[in-house]
Image (tube, rainbow, N blue to C red):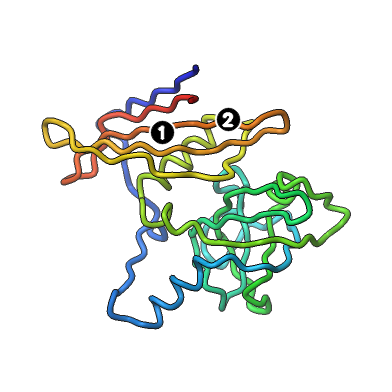
Amino acid sequence: MYSHYYHPSPSYPYVFHPYQNQSYSPHNPYVEYDRYYARQPVRGQASWTDGGAITQCGIPWSTNRYMTVAVGRNSPYQCGQTIKVKNLSNGREILVTVVDQVPTYPENKISLHRRAFETLGANVDVGIINVEIVAAPQLEEEKWGKYLLEIVQSAYPNYQATDYSTISKTPQNNNQMKEIYEFRMQSPQETIRIQGTVVYNPNTDRITSINFQEV
């Protein structure tokens, strides 16, 4: 078993990207419909791109170690959102971050960064593959889970996240909260499971400790 520990300094600016804290009104039926629709698997097609310096979301293609994607502007997937993409030809999956929007794309067409396309086991010479797309709603609603996903991607550079789950949330002494998430990571050779644990003050969102371990 291997563990990775992160002990943040008091000066570390725990500031989340604005797109990670989108608010939704529970009284807006159109927003609720979009959230419901975005949770349903959608079959479509994925192409690939090398990205560019400028995106419609203002988020770099290099985010999340290039596990990024462009979606249709009128699709239910929003800037900064995490979506799961499955290659229907081989069953491989990855979690990618929405960083760009294309006005002409229908809701079931996406463009993956080249690295994400290849991670799905697709040959760039093919150009387009059939995929299944689904939002990661639980991860979107769990801000610490999404934060840990970004860290675990960096901590395990030869692996890509393919799935996640929330394990537990438990109050601790001294006004602390402990949350545990599990991520499934895939490399060309193997699949491993990583548990990420964060302990923080729920009143200030200041982190006390972060830990990752293989399970």
Q: Position of residue 90 (x, y in %)?
A: 76, 49
At mark 1, the secondary structure is strand
Q: Position of residue 32 (x, y in %)?
A: 38, 76
In the image, what residue type sits under mark 1? Gly
At mark 2, the secondary structure is strand
The front one of 82 and 163 is: 163
Q: Is residue 182 left or right of residue 22?
A: right
Q: Residue at x 32, y 67 (%)?
A: 23
Q: Is residue 178 above or below residue 119?
A: above
Q: How many marks?
A: 2
Q: Pointer 1: what residue?
A: 196
Q: Pointer 2: what residue?
A: 192
In the image, what residue type sits under mark 2? Ile
The front one of 152 and 37 is: 37
Q: Residue furthest right?
A: 125
Tell me if label 2 and label 1 are in contact, CB under 8 Å: no
Q: Residue at x 78, y 60 (%)?
A: 129
Q: Position of residue 203 (x, y in %)?
A: 16, 46
Crowding at dot 2, Cα within 10 Å, few <14 / some 14-19 / many 20+, comes out as few
CA distance separating discs 2 and 1? 13 Å
Q: Is residue 154 above or below residue 4?
A: below
Q: Which of pointers 2 and 1 indicates the residue nearer the eye?
A: 2
Q: Position of residue 204 (x, y in %)?
A: 18, 45
